[in-house]
Amino acid sequence: MPPAMRLPVILVQNPPAAGHAVADALVASLIGFPGLDLTLVERFDSISVDSTDWMTLSAITVPAAVLDWRPAEELMSALNSIDFPGYRCAHRLDPDPPTSTTPHRRRLFLFDLNQHRDATSIVAELERLRDSLSVKTVSIGGLSAPGSATKASTSSTVAPTANAAAGTEPNAANATGHRKAISPINLGHDPSDDSLDQLLDQLDDLDV
C-alpha cells in the first residue's frame, strides 16, 4: 500500500494575549502527530524573501493547513502577498468559503484561531483533512488467482482419473490377451493314449 498523504500545518506565532493557551496546546498536540507536519512561522506580513520562513514556505508545494489569528479573507490576502498560492478550500471549521477565482489548484485549509480556540477540535479536523487527502488504492493483482487456482485444481484432479482409466484398459487387454484358446474336450468317448495326452496338455494349459 502506498504511504498516506502528509498534511503540512503552518501555525503563525505571536498570538494575542488571549490566545497563548490555545497556541501552546496546539504546539503540544501537533509535534510528532502522525501525518501532520507542523511548521511555525512569523506573521506573514513580516516575512521577507530572504528569510528562513520564506524558504520553508517555498518548499511546501502540496495542500496545506494554515492557522492564523485573523479572518480567513485577510489570511488569504497575506498568503498571496508572499507568493504562497492556492485556493481557500472548505472544511468543517470554514464551511462556506467564497468561490475561488485563482487558477492555482492547490488547496489551502484556513483556520481563524480567533474564532476557534478549542485545540482538540482543531486537531481532530486536521486529522480528518489528512485522511481525506490520503490516496487509497485497491490491489487488483489477485483477481484472476481464484480462477487460475480452480483450473489448476481441476486439471490435477482430472488428470489422475484419466490416467487411472487409461491404466485400466491395458490391464484388461493384457488379461484378455493371456487367455488361450482351449480346444473343446470331447468326453463322450473313451480316450486313447493320444487323446489322454492331449487332455493332460489342455489341463496343464488351464492351470496357467
Image (cartoon, rainbow, N blue to C red):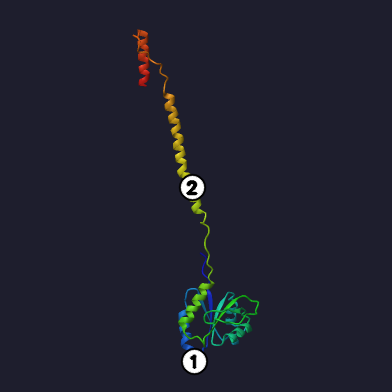
Residue type of the residue flagged with mark 2 = Ala
In the picture, the quarter occupied by the C terminus is top left
In the rendered view, tell whether residue 113 sits above or below residue 156: below
Name the residue rendered at 63%, 82% in the picture: 80
Residue holding disc 2 = 152
What secondary structure is marked by label 1?
A: helix
Q: Nearer the viewer, residue 92 or 29?
A: 92
> Is 65 rendered above or below residue 16?
above
Residue holding disc 1: 17
Residue density around tag 1, few if under 14, some if 14–19, many if 20 or more, within 10 Å: few
Residue 169 can be seen in this image = yes
- Residue 27 visible to the viewer: no
Residue at position x 57%, y 85% in the image: 72
Q: Residue 176: percent from the left, percent from the top?
A: 43, 26
Q: CA distance from mark 1 to mark 2?
A: 73 Å
Q: Residue furthest bottom?
A: 17
- Do the residues under discs 1 and 2 have CB atoms within 8 angstroms? no
Residue 91, compared with residue 163, is above or below; it is below
Give the image location of residue 164, x and y in percent. Answer: 44, 37
Q: Position of residue 24 (x, y in %)?
A: 46, 85
